[in-house]
Image (spheres, rainbow, N blue to C red):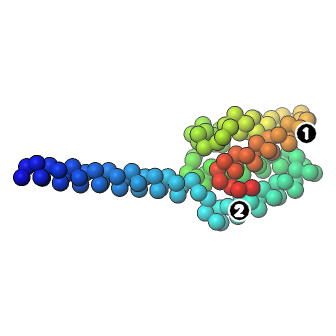
Amino acid sequence: MIIQNFVGIMTLVLVIVFLFIFFLIFLRKRHFVFNPKELQYIKSHWIRIIDMFHSHPRDAILDADKLLDYALKTKGYEGSLGEKLKKSGRLFSDIDSVWAAHKVRNSIAHDMDEMDEKYLRLALQNYKKALNDLGAKL
């Protein structure tokens, strides 16, 4: 009788643990998928950023940085973009390229020096890759 009760309790505990783990995985996966409204927002802003890049590349980089910040905010990350990147680094296939793009943004925002367009173009490509890593499908 005692053994049957023990087996029954252990089975119940295992079922509860299994359901808890399944629930956590489900919530985590759901958390990392953009809803249709967020996805549309990201895609429409990306198109605007690409159009802007041809005439105002520095402004386009600033906006791409803001868009990445928005995407991470919708994923539940808080703080400055730098803080969000520190917390979310595992989401990106190449976090170093994301940091490089963000550093280009910082140079634009804080320095008045001209920057070679190849660096701006690379930063834009890195932002696109980062947004795609998050599921933006650009």
- Mark 2 neighbour density, 10 Å: few (under 14) some (14–19) many (20 or more): some
Q: Identify the amino acid type marked 1.
A: Glu
Residues 26 and 100: in front is: 26
Question: In this picture, is 99 found above or below 72?
Answer: above
Residue 29 on image: x %, y %: 52, 54
- Mark sitting on residue 41: 2
Residue depicted at x 47% and y 56%: 27
Q: Which residue is mark 1?
A: 117
Furthest residue to the right?
55
Residue at point 30%, 54% (across, down): 16
Query: Which residue is nearer to you in this view: 51 or 30?
Result: 30
Residue 35 pos. (x, y %): 61, 63
Is disc 2 in contact with disc 1, using a CB cutoff of under 8 Å? Answer: no
First-in-chain label (2 vs 1): 2
Q: Foreground residue, 7 or 59?
A: 7
Q: CA distance from mark 2 to mark 1?
A: 27 Å
